[in-house]
Image (cartoon, grey):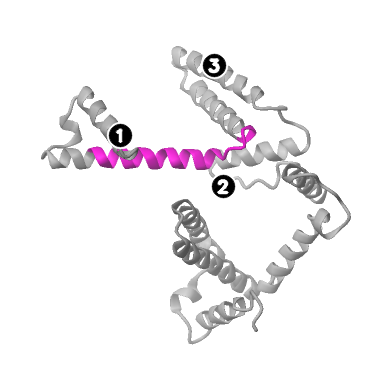
Amino acid sequence: MSKRGESLAQLVELMETLLGPNGCPWDREQTLESLRQYVIEEAHEVVDAIDGGEPEMLREELGDLLLQVVFQAALTERQGWFDIDGVVDGISEKLIRRHPWVFGDEEVDDASGAINSWEAIKAKEKKERGALGGVPVSLPGLLRAVRIGEKASAVGYDWPDAGGPRAKIDEELAELDEAAENGDLAALEHELGDLLFALATYGRKQGLDPEAAIRASLNRFSSRFRHCELHAKAEGKDLRDYDEQALDAMWERAKAAERGE
C-alpha cells in the first residue's frame, strides 16, 4: 500500500522532464520572477474554489498551486540554493518546533492559546526582524491589517475586546468627515486608511475575516448588478436609461430575487 504523499515524487519527476533538454521551451525560460504572478493567481483561485464550495474545483486549484511550489523549487535547485526536499524538511521541522503542545510537554487550553504560543515562538526565532517582520507587504490590505493586528496582539499590544476598535471606528469616521469638510485630499486618504484599519481590527476582535467579508459583499453586489443589467436588457434598455428611483426599485427586486422571494 502506498503512503500518502508519495505521489508528490511523480510531480517532481514530471517537472524535471519539463525542464530537461527535451522538455518544454516555455518552462525552461521561466525564472522565479516570471513565476511570481502565477503564484499569486493560483492562490487566489484556491480561495475562489473554497468560497464556491466545489471540491473538484478545489482539488484542481490546489494542484495548480502545488505545481508552482514544485516549479520554483526546481529552479532554486538549479541555482544551488535548495531543492523540494529542503522545502518539505524545512516546513516539517518548523511545524514540530512550533507545536510543543503536540510534540513536546507544553500545554494549551484552546485555539487562542495555541495561536499565542505559536506567535511567541515565532517572535523569538525572528526577534531581529521585529514582531511585524513576518507579515508580507504584498498581502491584500484588509488581510495584512488582520495579520498585523494578530502579531501585535501576540506581544500584548491590542484592545481587550471589540469595544476598543468599535469606539475607534467612530473616532476615525469623525476625522474622515472633518477632512472631507476641509477639502484636504491627503488627510482624507489618511483618515480613510485609518478607518479601514479600525474596521479590520473590529472584525478580527469579533472573530470575523474582513477579507472574506468584503469578498462576500462584492459578490452580492456583482450578482445584484448583473440582475439589473439583465432586467434592463430584457426591456431593450441600458442601465443609463433609468432614473435613480427606477434603479433603486430594480435593485430591491434583485435583492428580493436573491432571497428567493
Q: Nearer the viewer, residue 154 or 30?
A: 154
Disc sitting over residue 256 in the figure: 1
Farthest-out residue, front: 261
Residue 76 percent coordinates (x, y) = 63, 70
Residue for point 46% across, 56% down? 49
Q: Nearer the viewer, residue 210 or 50?
A: 50
70 lies above or below 250: below
Residue 73 percent coordinates (x, y) = 62, 70
- Number of callouts: 3
Residue for point 58% across, 66% down? 69
Residue 74 percent coordinates (x, y) = 60, 74
Per the image, the residue denoted by label 3 is 175
Disc sitting over residue 138 in the figure: 2
The quarter of the displayed image where residue 236 is located = top left
Q: Secondary structure at mark 1?
A: helix
Q: Which quadrant of the rendered structure holds the C terminus?
A: top left
Q: Nearer the viewer, residue 254 or 241?
A: 254
The chief SS type of the magenta part is: helix
Say which amino acid is labelled 3: Glu
Residue 10 percent coordinates (x, y) = 57, 81
Farthest-out residue, right: 105
213 in magenta? yes
3D distance between C-alphas at marks 1 and 3 = 36 Å
229 in magenta? no
Say which amino acid is labelled 1: Ala
3D distance between C-alphas at marks 2 and 1 = 38 Å
Q: Secondary structure at mark 3?
A: helix
Q: Which residues are magenta?
A: 204-228
Q: Secondary structure at mark 2?
A: loop
Residue for point 55% across, 26% down? 195
Going by the image, does 125 lie left or right of 233? right
Q: Which is nearer the N-term, disc 2 or disc 1? A: 2
